[in-house]
Image (cartoon, rainbow, N blue to C red):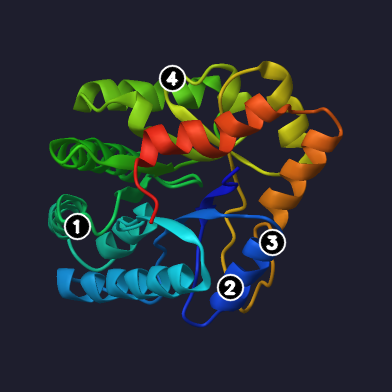
């Protein structure tokens, strides 16, 4: 079975290949490598350099033996940072130019999807909240044009949040079976409103989610941050906890196959 970590970061200042080796040694096979901000940028050229870093890190991970699907987009927090120095309308324009660039990479088969798109995971003023949601909606419309998968970064999700995200997807006519709520848990899974859910692979999340008998994926959201080693969860976590869950009859082989192969294959379509 190709054990898949559905949300994994690498950082040029971090452990990089050493983290990938740990994942593989623990029994992992596939990574959804998600772009993250490495430094500040304020225009498309700056952002493209950042994405090139992610593509280089993916290449190195493949050289270690991992199968990788790359997801890239300007992080929603970058939209807020842009709006601190330029008008909101201009900030959205720059941000959406970056989203368009990533959609072109999907068309060129250099990445499989866009992520993390979304909105702030912390309280902001109402105008910024509405601005972020509007930008997300426009971003989904761009992603839809190239049939891209989208990984969402938002606040912690219960059924009301999932409903709201579903409405945004409907407004954008974006297919919810290609829309992934990352950093999810049982509360997101109980009523996902058609979105896909990737649970953080804590013991409690795995135990509770397995009881629901609803399809989900597993992730560490490993940050590869030299200032926070092991955050959010370490590289070994998904393969180790999958094996333990099978041994303890929390999940069976059929469910493990769904978590690690069937669902990721249908959403990302291409690991290489």
Rendered residue at 64%/62% (across/down):
23
User: How far is mark 4 from mark 3, CA to CA?
Assistant: 31 Å
Rendered residue at 39%/43% (across/down):
151
The residue identified by callout 2 is 225
**Image position of 131 (left or right of 16):** left
User: How far is mark 2 from mark 4, CA to CA?
Assistant: 32 Å
The residue identified by callout 3 is 234
Q: Residue 144 lies in what quarter of the image?
A: top left
Classify 10 Å Cα crowding around label 3: few (below 14), some (14-19), many (20 and above). some
* SS class, disc 4: helix
- Total labels: the figure holds 4
Q: Nearer the viewer, mark 4 or mark 1?
A: 1
The residue identified by callout 4 is 163
Closer to the chain start, of discs 2 and 4, is: 4
Residue 35: x %, y % from top left: 39, 62
- Is disc 4 in contact with disc 1, using a CB cutoff of under 8 Å? no
Closer to the chain start, of discs 3 and 2, is: 2
Closer to the chain start, of discs 4 and 3, is: 4
Classify 10 Å Cα crowding around label 1: few (below 14), some (14-19), many (20 and above). some
* SS class, disc 3: loop
User: How far is mark 1 from mark 3, CA to CA?
Assistant: 29 Å
């Amino acid at each position: 079975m190709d054990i898949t970590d559905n949300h994994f970061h690498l950082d040029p200042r971090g452990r990089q290949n050493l983290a990938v080796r740990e994942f593989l040694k623990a029994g992992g096979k596939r990574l959804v490598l998600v772009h993250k901000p490495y430094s500040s940028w304020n225009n498309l050229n700056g952002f493209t350099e950042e994405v090139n870093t992610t593509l280089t890190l993916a290449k190195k991970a493949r050289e270690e033996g991992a199968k990788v699907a790359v997801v890239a987009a300007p992080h929603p927090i970058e939209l807020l940072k842009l709006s601190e120095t330029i008008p909101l309308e201009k900030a959205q324009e720059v941000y959406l130019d970056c989203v368009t660039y990533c959609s072109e990479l999907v068309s060129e088969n250099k990445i499989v999807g866009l992520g993390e798109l979304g909105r702030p995971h912390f309280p902001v003023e109402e105008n910024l909240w509405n601005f972020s949601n509007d930008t997300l909606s426009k971003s989904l419309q761009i992603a839809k044009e190239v049939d891209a998968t989208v990984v969402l970064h938002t606040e912690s999700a219960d059924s009301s949040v999932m409903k709201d995200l579903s409405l945004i997807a409907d407004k954008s006519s974006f297919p919810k079976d290609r829309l992934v709520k990352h950093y999810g848990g049982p509360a997101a899974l109980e009523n996902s409103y058609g979105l896909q859910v990737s649970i953080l692979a804590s013991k409690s999340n795995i135990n509770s989610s397995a009881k629901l008998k609803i399809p989900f994926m597993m992730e560490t959201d490993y940050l590869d941050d030299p200032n926070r080693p092991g955050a959010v969860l370490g590289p070994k976590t998904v393969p180790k906890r999958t094996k333990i869950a099978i041994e303890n009859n929390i999940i069976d082989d059929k469910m493990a196959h769904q978590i690690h192969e069937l669902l990721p294959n249908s959403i990302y379509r291409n690991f290489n």
